[in-house]
Image: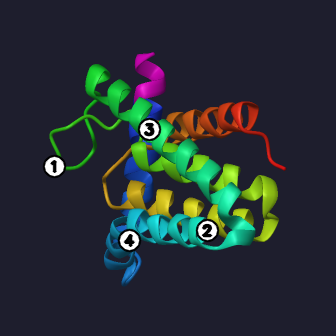
Amino acid sequence: MRTLTRIDRRLGAGVRRASAATPGAPAAARALAAGMSPAFRVVVAAMVLRRPTRAAGLRALAAGAGASLVARALRDRLGRRRPGARADGGFPSRHAAASVAIAAAAGRDHARIGSGLAVATAAGLLARVADAEHEPADIVAGAALGLLAAHLVERIAPAG
């Protein structure tokens, strides 16, 4: 396990070094990481408000909220140190769990929305590593949790 942790930390440090060496990348990563949650909230709210996407929006909301709650409980219990200055744990990533769950749930009924959210998720989560909010393993674990949450919501409330 220590070897995997060392590899994970080195990979994250490499992403942060590459970001630091690219003009404008640190500021862009910081802005993208900070804007991720509000943007996903707006998309889910818009889906819920529009009749053609309402059911998918509600499933995306349920999957994202469920994944986020479980990720937070695990994160608080495990307490794995983040790479940056924040004192709270980072494993698994709540942002990864929620955004992947939302993208997967929305994409089941609306492929274009799901694809757009998947691209935004990938960019936002890479930015969270570049901005020292998470290590890659935090993201992978959160993403797996998000996929599980979307699958469970689909089993409970299947798409029409």
- Lower sequence index among marks 4 and 2: 4
Contact? badges 3 and 2 (CB < 8 Å): no
Local secondary structure at mark 3: helix
Local secondary structure at mark 2: helix
Local secondary structure at mark 1: loop
Q: Which residue is mark 2?
A: 47
The residue segment tinted magenta is: 1-5
Can you tell which mark lies on residue 101? Answer: none
From the top left corner, tell me how far across and down residue 147 is, in percent: 65, 39
- Looking at the image, which is closer to me, 94 or 11? 94
- Lower sequence index among marks 1 and 4: 4
Q: Which residue is mark 1?
A: 85
From the top left corner, tell me how far across and down residue 80 is, in percent: 29, 28
Q: Is residue 44 magenta?
A: no
Mark in front: 1 vs 4: 4
Residue plotted at (41% across, 27% down)? 5
- In this view, 119 is above or below 81: below
- In this view, 123 is above or below 156: below
Mark in front: 4 vs 3: 4
For label 4, count other residues whose C-alpha is less than 10 Å away and answer few (under 14), some (14-19) or many (20+). Answer: few
- In this view, 1 is above or below 72: above
